């Protein structure tokens, strides 16, 4: 029978379960024993800290992750709880490169040897690292548990291993490991829920608390959502009178569009600054980029990686290019064609509804006018979702080595399709049919329908399903127990059945499309911003609900910015300059201003467009990406690290020199 | 009397003079003694290497630069030769962060402790560092000779010092130090001259030799000049038949312009790749950025730098902003206005010449047609040069703390003015007068005149002056000596009177304006590329002549790219898309294609323009900035340095641990 506890420190009084490992039912005893032993094993025998250091010289020599593991009491036999001693977590924090605040308020990379200089650090303060950080460290250590000289997973000869292969990733891909997920902290979650959406209040979200609980990626999404909502308010406020007073003047629309176009540049640039402020405070702005390992799904023939010199699967870049250009690209084009085909069907329907309305004019028939748009909006949403799965499958099949490369190809595929799928009909109405009334109606229907659908599909439906399930679960358990506080075993059993949060991709995509609806045709439908603001306010609540109630807790992911989405939003903002200028150029009021020469009209519009584009680029260039005080702090840190590195390396060399002299 | 020799090594048989220091005549003995002592002094007494290391802990504690200095024999008394021992240079190479090739063909930062692993390293091989590198190291060490607790330069109470102030910079600004310059190596220079422009041959320039002799910045300029010339050849070749067959077809011009626009994007992207290949080979791609010290001319009240915590002059950013926006900006605007005013005078002249030609038609009068353009071209060149000095003065007066910030503001000022000054008349002719014939004539005259003027003013005139001067010098010396090989003293006396090369700024600016002439109106005057190619071929020779014969040898400056010029060229290429599209849109042939609707014409042109711009941006995005093998090598180095840093820091901590245990 395996020893289920391992002590890194001499005394570790309380085991705090942080992460849950669920193995497949019926996993062989031999495999479980080997796997838990690898998790528990010390890096090596002997002095703990010294050996921890030594482990860096010969990573393959040492076996274990030196974590704590315990089978779930009273629970199903294939579930294990993983924790770690306080010391182990601190050393892990150094390994993953966590950046924490020092006593002098500067942010520095945490190292065990300089631990005393950090704010709130005390040897007995187990809250120095947040629970999310501890869980991130454990995930990192588990994923870096690498095969030594095992050729396969014991008990499963078909699950091949090679030196340096991550054991957990192989267990996951071969289905022996069902899932790894971090546990919720019910006390903390309750507090967070209360301050986040528990009471009806006007104010900011508790971003720092969200970050402590869910990590930086998710906190940054909510930060962006909130910022974006606030940034839309001026547009919404300016847009309301257009609706109330039914303004249709050309000059007012031009003013609104111009404001919109420049404003969207400003908000995107200012977001970079706010993002820098947030991530500096959270330490991720300073976190060093770790060397990127191959992604879990990557496969290939065993070869030598020319960069690391390590043995790992190698996949020819040519083959990948062939797959991308000969399969993925045609497939995407086919999907785009299909999307356009569906659009044409929508226009037929629209025509049919219009004819119907003309023939028998009634309240019902005027309602019928909206039906094609609503149906089309639903179809668009469905197509987006189906395409999303296809894109994931294809990108995964392209077999990218790095997660970042996989993500870039996936995002590119999805963005192009979603953009065309959502906006093609609007472009067609605007620039081929020249029907501004239909454009406005279609835009409104698409925007509102997609918002309602999204809110429903994303949060409310899963919430309802989850609620029903947990009620049933509780009923079953209550037959045995009446205690209101669930035991760990019950909590784990509850949480393991919850859905998995698949990352912020869909949430950002939704915002991206919303930004498109608001900015691409802003001069035609100023009310779009109002709907966007209203939607985003409820979105904050429903997304918060989704994070806290519907899904398993996700692992925290340190991140310093919103990545490729910044570029995507900026591109959308450039495209919207072009569309808005064309729309304004087509307006009959402007036409009336140039009665003699259409030429002059078009030339002036083109001139204005180029001017706005130039101003946008100059503004993006002039507004610094980081506020001045953050720049200063970064410069100071860089200066110090240059100085320190010099000193440290010299000191080391000097010591060697001493040693050589004195021996 | 001062000891003029210092021995870092126990035996240093041959003193090789590398750098010349010229003090003002009549400099006080006390000052000279203090200054030479500071140059000569050891970092500290005791073990050389150990103390070298120690110097990093308390930079202000140690006094000297530990270089060798010698008064010029037979020469004027205020000139000194500076050299350094081989060991000192090797240690200096580590300090400045030189990157050299290892025995395994990888590029690594040189360290003294790992010296044996470098290619061609041997303790007795004094050619391991090139002479340019040695001179760069000496310059770096001299500039980093900092005041300790001196309050002023001995003998000059008005020349204030404060702890950490660079002594050499203060001596230069207070006029005690006239100049510091590196010596030519007459043997090497002869070889270089021969292989560079000595024989008439078709082939590449010896870029690696140029880099060894003049450093990376200059070699990169010549590399860019050569690359740019080759890149223009396809344009020139395509352009010739337009002249020969007098093609005036609309579709042929469109083809030429489209090719030009896409080609210019390609060449600028490909240059980045070539630049990466060159600078990887030269080691500068990998060189770590050093912490940027305040520029020599920067002044302010003594305060604490918030980044470094050191005492240094501080100048309020607000004051600088005020100077920029309240003085510099209005001044630049005034200059622009003046330039436009001169342009209007040129048009009056042009009109006058035209009238004259109409009244009395003769060969002379048709020649007279070109006179206004030529005069205007000369005036433009003169204005450019005067403005350049004004811009330098203003930017210097703005008192920027960093050299990079100074350079950016200077370049921005100069580029804006030069762009307007050179191209305003062409824009006016093209888009206000709509006179394509005049545009072509004006463009040709401006381009050719400015090229001739530049070649003359930049190289031939200084060369002639220099030749006359050195002939006179030689004559005077030959009265005493007939030996063909000049002694060091004579060489120094010759070289100290040569002009100082002020950097690559003017050379790049010339290429930038040339690029403007070629690309902005390429569809009107395809022959511009031909002239540009012809000019650049002679430019290579005259610039080479200038570097080798006219100017003092410049200090080598490591650099990894052409910096802000890349951005400037790319911006020009974007602007040229717009101008060419408009020009094509205005062509009467295209007009004839759309007889019914001018609208359709303008819309199609705008569509094509947006398409080309989109293609440009996508191309710039798709073409990787570094070739794949360089990317791999960089990734490998990054991986290794991450691993090594981990190991080194651990090893150091481990040693400390051992020490703590064993004591």
Image (cartoon, coloured by chain):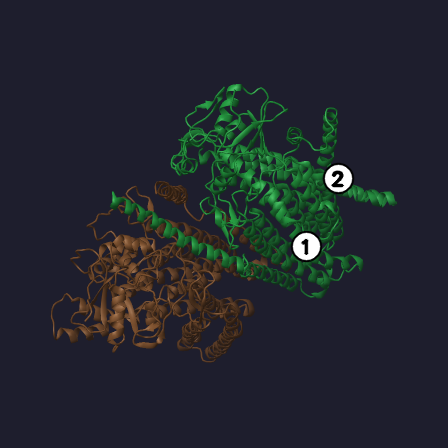
Chain colours: A green, B brown
Q: Which mark is residue A375?
A: 2
In-front residue for pair A226/A645: A645
Q: Chain of mark 1?
A: A
Rounded to the nearest whole Å, what is the CA distance between mark 2 and mark 1? 31 Å
Would you name the residue on which mark 1 appears? A230
Q: Residues within 10 Å of mark 1 (few under 14, many from 20)?
A: some
User: In the image, residue B583 lies at what x, y percent?
Assistant: 53, 61
Above or below A478: residue A584: below
Asked if badge 2 and badge 1 are on a common chain, one would say: yes
Q: Secondary structure at mark 1?
A: helix
Query: Looking at the image, do the residues carrying marks 2 and 1 touch, with CB atoms under 8 Å apart?
Result: no
* Pointer 2 or 1: first along the chain: 1
Q: Residues within 10 Å of mark 2 (few under 14, many from 20)?
A: some
User: In the image, residue A306 lies at what x, y percent?
Assistant: 39, 37
User: In the image, residue A184 lies at what x, y percent?
Assistant: 63, 36
The answer to whether A645 appears left or right of A591 in the picture is left
The answer to whether B220 appears left or right of B15 in the picture is right
Q: Chain of mark 2?
A: A
Q: Which mark is residue B397?
A: none
In-front residue for pair B203/A663: A663
Above or below A326: residue B262: below
In what quadrant of the picture does the C terminus of chain A appear?
top left
In-front residue for pair A132/A381: A132
Q: Secondary structure at mark 2?
A: helix
The answer to whether A571 appears left or right of B382 in the picture is right
**Residue B248 shows in the view:** no
């Amino acid at each position: 029978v395996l020893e289920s506890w391992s002590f890194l420190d001499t005394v570790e009084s309380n085991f705090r379960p942080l992460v849950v490992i669920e193995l497949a039912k019926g996993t062989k005893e031999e495999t479980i024993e080997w796997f838990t032993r690898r998790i528990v094993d010390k890096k090596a025998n002997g002095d703990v800290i010294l050996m921890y250091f030594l482990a860096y010289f010969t990573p393959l020599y040492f076996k274990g992750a030196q974590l704590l593991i315990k089978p779930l009491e009273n629970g199903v036999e294939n579930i294990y709880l993983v924790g770690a001693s306080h010391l182990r977590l601190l050393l892990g924090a150094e390994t993953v490169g966590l950046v924490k605040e020092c006593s002098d308020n500067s942010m520095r990379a945490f190292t065990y040897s300089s631990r005393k200089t950090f704010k709130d650090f005390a040897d007995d303060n187990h809250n120095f690292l947040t629970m999310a950080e501890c869980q991130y460290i454990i995930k990192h250590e588990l994923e870096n548990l690498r095969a030594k000289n095992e050729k396969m997973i014991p008990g499963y000869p078909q699950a091949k291993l090679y030196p340096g292969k991550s054991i957990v990733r192989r267990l996951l891909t071969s289905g022996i490991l069902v899932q790894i997920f971090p546990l919720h902290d019910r006390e903390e979650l309750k507090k967070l829920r209360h301050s986040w959406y528990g009471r009806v209040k006007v104010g900011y979200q508790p971003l720092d608390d969200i970050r402590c609980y869910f990590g930086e990626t998710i906190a940054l999404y909510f930060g962006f959502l909130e910022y974006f909502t606030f940034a839309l308010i001026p547009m919404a406020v300016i847009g309301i009178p257009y609706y109330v007073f039914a303004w249709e003047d050309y000059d007012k629309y031009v003013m609104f569009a111009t404001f919109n176009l420049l404003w969207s540049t400003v908000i995107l640039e200012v977001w970079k600054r706010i993002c820098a402020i947030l991530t500096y405070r959270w330490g991720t702005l300073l976190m060093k980029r770790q060397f990127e390992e191959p992604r879990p799904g990557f496969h290939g023939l065993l070869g030598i990686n020319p960069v690391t010199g390590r043995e790992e699967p190698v996949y020819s870049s040519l083959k990948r290019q062939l797959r991308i250009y000969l399969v993925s690209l045609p497939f995407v084009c086919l999907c785009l064609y299909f999307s356009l085909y569906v659009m044409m069907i929508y226009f037929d329907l629209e025509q049919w509804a219009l004819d119907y309305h003309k023939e028998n004019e009634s309240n019902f028939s005027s309602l019928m006018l909206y039906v094609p748009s609503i149906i089309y909006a639903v179809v668009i949403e469905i197509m987006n979702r189906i395409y999303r799965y296809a894109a994931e499958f294809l990108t995964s099949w392209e077999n990218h080595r790095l997660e970042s490369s996989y993500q870039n190809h996936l995002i590119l595929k999805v963005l192009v399709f979603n953009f065309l799928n959502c906006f093609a009909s609007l472009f067609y109405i605007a620039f081929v049919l020249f029907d501004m009334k239909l454009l406005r109606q279609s835009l409104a229907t698409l925007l509102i329908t997609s918002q309602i659908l999204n809110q429903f599909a994303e949060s409310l439906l899963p919430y309802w399903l989850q609620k029903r399930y947990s009620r049933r679960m509780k009923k079953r358990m209550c037959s045995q127990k009446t205690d209101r506080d669930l035991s760990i075993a019950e909590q784990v059993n509850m949480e393991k059945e919850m859905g998995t949060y698949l990352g912020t991709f869909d949430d950002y995509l939704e915002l991206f499309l919303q930004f498109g609806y608001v900015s691409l045709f802003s001069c035609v439908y100023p009310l779009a911003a109002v709907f966007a603001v209203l939607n985003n306010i409820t979105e904050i609540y429903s997304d918060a609900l989704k994070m806290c109630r519907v899904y398993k807790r996700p692992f925290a992911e340190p991140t310093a910015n919103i990545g490729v989405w910044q570029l995507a939003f900026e591109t959308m903002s450039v495209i919207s300059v072009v569309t808005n200028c064309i729309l304004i150029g087509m307006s009959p009021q402007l036409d009336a201003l140039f009665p003699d020469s259409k030429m002059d009209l078009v030339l002036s519009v083109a001139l204005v467009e180029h001017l706005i584009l130039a101003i946008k680029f100059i503004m993006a260039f002039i507004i610094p990406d980081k506020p001045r005080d953050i720049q200063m702090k970064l410069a100071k840190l860089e200066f110090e690290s240059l100085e320190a590195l010099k000193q440290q390396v010299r000191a080391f060399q000097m010591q060697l020199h001493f040693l050589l002299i004195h021996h």
